[in-house]
Image: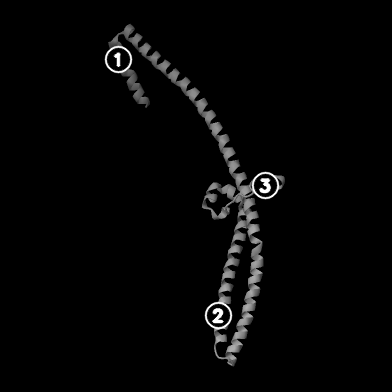
Amino acid sequence: MRQKGSGRQKETYVRALEGKKIPVLTLDNKWYQLLTQEARQEVSGLEEQLNTLLKQQGRLNKQIKGIKRLKKKLMGEIVSMMEEAEGDSDNAQKTEQNKKLVEECNERLEARQDELLDLPKQIEEANFQLMLATMDCCYDTMKENKEMIQETEQWITEIRVELKKRLIRKQEMEQRNQTIYSYMHDVFGAEVIDIFDMQHDSEEMEEQ
């Protein structure tokens, strides 16, 4: 795959695009319409990398929400049991178990939040690389189309010139045929020409 947008050129783009919001490409249906099947294969590695990061982000956010729900439920049970009569050994044991589970929830939350912390930057970088590759593909396609358009325009121009020549030649031959036929009538007379017309019409029908 081409890497035109790397090195010094990438730095130029970064400065030029600073402050510009670039949408996440693989979440935009129009992005898929930008590329031909061949171009999609060319950027498939970057596309897969971006989608993997997005899935990872979605998975972590989902897990964090689930852990927070569990923690809230455990905290609610602890408060409820603390409000009940003291000296209840079952409640005390259950409260301790819930407290340990809450601590585990906090540890799991911290681990996932740490993992989630760097993902936006990674997604932004992957999206930026995919954008550069997409731009390369799009401009290459437009360049190829432009060249084909120019070739087609040249072909059309040449065909028009040839068509004009042939039309003039056609008119000249038609005029020549009319002149010949008129002189034939004058020289041989209508009755003789009618006989030859019938013969030639019959031959033409047989040839068809």
Q: Percent position (x, y) of residue 57?
A: 60, 63
**Camera-nearest residue between 190 and 18:** 18
Q: Is residue 45 above or below residue 85?
A: above
Q: Which mark lies nearer to you, 1 or 3? A: 3
Task: Answer few, some or many: residues within 10 Å of disc 3's Cα (few below 14, many 20 plus, some between 14 and 19).
Answer: few
- Looking at the image, residue 131 sits to the left or right of residue 169; the answer is right
**Camera-nearest residue between 78 and 162:** 78
Task: Answer few, some or many: residues within 10 Å of disc 1's Cα (few below 14, many 20 plus, some between 14 and 19).
Answer: few
CA distance for labels 3 and 2: 51 Å
* Mark 1 residue type: Ile
Residue at figure coordinates x 60%, y 82% from the top left: 98
Does the rendering let one see residue 2? no
* Mark 3 residue type: Arg
What mark, if any, has residue 76 been given in the picture? 2
Where does label 3 land, which residue? 15
**N-terminal-most mark, 1 or 2:** 2
Q: Percent position (x, y) of residue 171?
A: 41, 17
* Mark 2 residue type: Gly
Residue furthest to the left in view is 191
**Camera-nearest residue between 79 and 9:** 79
The answer to the question of whether label 3 and label 2 lie on touching residues, with beta carbons closer than 8 A, is no
Q: Is residue 110 above or below residue 128?
A: below
